[in-house]
Amino acid sequence: MSSGPRRVGVMGGTFDPIHNGHLVAASEVAATFDLDEVVFVPTGIPYQKQHVTAAEHRYLMTVIATASNPRFTVSRVDIDRPGETYTIDTLRDLAEVYGEETELYFITGADAVEQILTWKDVEELFSLAHFVGVTRPGHDLNGDGIPTDELSQLQIPALAISSTDCRARVEKGLPVWYLVPDGVVQYIAKHELYRSEDG
Ligand code: ATP
């Protein structure tokens, strides 16, 4: 637990499904920045992605994956807000939920860091949260153009796992054990997710 203002990490993602790469990223940032909590925020309708699994499935998989960590929580702000999800709305809502004394740390993988300057209302984004970019295999961590006091860059253990690959593996009948938490493997099987186009 940190002294001073409460520090909360924000791990936004589609989580379709949540995998161990997401969990390690959150855990590493929590340890490095002495965070009191990391809130996982499954997106509603991501404006950049075409087909995603129903929000309730993604939300429940995120709850299952984070349940054993006392610092991890899950927020419904994005899935309960109508329309497409923009990070600026996520951070505005969380700033209201946590109050202005709380410092928010928005966590992104290297692939997303490259995009930040194109995000909606970027100046306000930086005023609402400090950004932490984490390394991800296959992507250069490049914060060019982002002021250094707005973005920290953190090297984390390399896990070459993506949700896209997990979905493809399930569809082909390949295992996802140890790529996603056990409970998520079981949830995917129980609800027959990722078996077809309708997954
Ligand atoms: P997809 O393959 O469907 O695009 P994804 O695996 O990239 O999904 P998201 O839910 O889109 O997962 O990612 C949420 C956040 O987690 C993003 O900031 C992303 O960069 C980061 N992230 C995802 N996988 C990793 C990983 N293996 N290592 C580090 N960061 C990751």
Image (cartoon, rainbow, N blue to C red):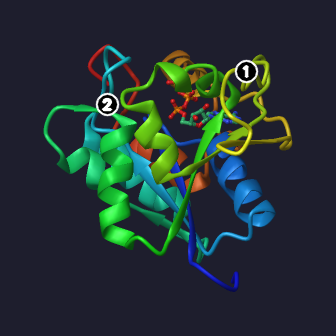
What residue does disc 2 label?
Answer: 53
Quadrant of residue 31 within the rendered picture: bottom right
Quarter of image, ligand 1: top right
Percent x, y of residue 18: 52, 42
**Is the residue indicated by label 1 positioned so its CB lies within 8 Å of ligand 1?**
no
What residue does disc 1 label?
Answer: 144
Badge 2 or badge 1: first in the primary sequence:
2
Position of the C terminus, as image quadrant, is top left
Q: Identify which residue is drawn at 37% across, 62% down.
A: 95
182 horizontally vs 95: left or right = right
Amino acid type of the residue tagged 2 in the rendering: Thr
Count of numbered circles in the view: 2
Q: Which mark is residue 75?
A: none
Give the farthest residue toward the left: 82
Q: Secondary structure at mark 2?
A: loop
Q: Identify which residue, 31 or 55, lies in the foreground.
A: 31
Percent x, y of residue 68: 58, 71
Position of the N terminus, as image quadrant, is bottom right
Percent x, y of residue 161: 69, 30
Q: Is residue 56 visible?
A: no
Crowd tier of the residue under label 2, counting other residues whose Cα lies within 10 Å: few below 14, some 14–19, many 20 or above: some
Q: Secondary structure at mark 1?
A: loop
Q: Identify which residue, 120 or 178, lies in the foreground.
A: 120
Q: Identify which residue is drawn at 47% across, 75% down.
A: 101
**Is the residue indicated by label 2 positioned so its CB lies within 8 Å of ligand 1?**
no
Q: Is residue 39 visible?
A: yes
Q: Is residue 49 above or below residue 58?
A: above
Percent x, y of residue 23: 65, 51
Q: Identify which residue is drawn at 32% across, 52% down.
A: 92
